[in-house]
Image (cartoon, rainbow, N blue to C red):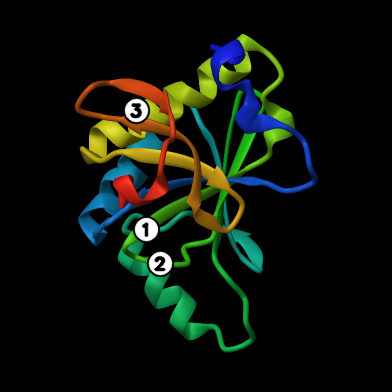
């Protein structure tokens, strides 16, 4: 797999984004359930580390209470990976990932397992993109076909 998808994890000093588009609060609830039921180390913070709320609606409420620009951050650790979610948008689940964490077949396999599990539970495709560039898609997971493909023309996927 690394020979086919390793190009997406070149180290240029930037992160990559794992994105799932067109999400709802129900999708966020499903994500929270996946994260709690998996073998993931979770750390949630709002300036200070606190317990991850049971419902993602509570994250929105907590964010509104803070007026000093403290943002919610969820760190998800598994294998060599630490994915970060900052709850930017309700309609888009985004995790930042460090391409330096993908060095071996096992590293890529554990990342793809996370992507597959999440996307299948949400019944949505997922993409890995250049950092902060949702149209610069590198890899796409197609949940209906249950496969990973090199992303083609970004316009065809939106």
- In the image, 11: left or right of 57? right
98 w.r.t. 58: above or below: above
Give the residue pinned by disc 2. 89
Question: Counting other residues with Cα less than 10 Å from the Cα at mark 3, is it few (<14), some (14-19), or many (20 or more)?
Answer: some
* Distance Cα–Cα, label 1 vs label 2: 5 Å
> Front-most of 64 and 115?
115
Choose top left, top right, bottom left or bottom right for residue 132.
bottom right
Q: Residue 155: where, in percent of width, then height?
A: 35, 51
Give the residue pinned by disc 3. 117
* Residue shown at the point (27%, 56%) measured from the top left: 23
Which mark is on residue 146?
none
* Distance Cα–Cα, label 3 vs label 1: 17 Å
> Front-most of 63 and 53?
63
* Residue shown at the point (61%, 52%) measured from the top left: 131
3 and 2 marks in contact (CB < 8 Å): no
Q: Residue 147: where, in percent of width, then height?
A: 33, 20
Q: Which type of secondary structure does the marked residue at label 2 adopt? A: loop
Q: Which type of secondary structure does the marked residue at label 3 adopt? A: helix
Q: Which type of secondary structure does the marked residue at label 1 adopt? A: strand
* Residue shown at the point (60%, 14%) measured from the top left: 2
Q: Residue 34: where, in percent of width, then height?
A: 34, 36
* Residue shown at the point (40%, 25%) measured from the top left: 149
3 and 1 marks in contact (CB < 8 Å): no
- In the image, 86: left or right of 38? right
* Distance Cα–Cα, label 3 vs label 2: 21 Å
**Mark nearer the viewer, 3 or 1:** 1
1 and 2 marks in contact (CB < 8 Å): yes
Res. 38 in view: no
Of pointers 3 and 1, the one earlier in the residue sequence: 1
Res. 108 in view: yes
158 w.r.t. 137: above or below: below
Number of numbered discs on residues: 3
């Amino acid at each position: 797999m690394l020979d086919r998808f390793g190009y997406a994890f070149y180290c240029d000093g930037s992160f990559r984004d794992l994105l799932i588009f067109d999400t709802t609060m129900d999708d966020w609830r499903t994500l929270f359930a996946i994260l709690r039921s998996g073998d993931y180390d979770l750390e949630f913070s709002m300036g200070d580390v606190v317990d991850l709320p049971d419902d993602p609606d509570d994250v929105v409420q907590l964010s509104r209470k803070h007026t000093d620009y403290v943002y919610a951050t969820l760190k998800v650790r598994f294998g060599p990976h630490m994915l970060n979610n900052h709850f930017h948008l309700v309609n888009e689940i985004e995790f930042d990932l460090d391409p330096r964490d993908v060095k071996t077949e096992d590293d890529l396999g554990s990342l793809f397992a996370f992507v597959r599990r999440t996307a299948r539970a949400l019944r949505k495709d997922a993409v890995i993109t250049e950092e902060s560039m949702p149209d610069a898609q590198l890899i796409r997971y197609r949940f209906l076909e249950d496969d990973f493909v090199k992303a083609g023309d970004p316009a065809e996927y939106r």
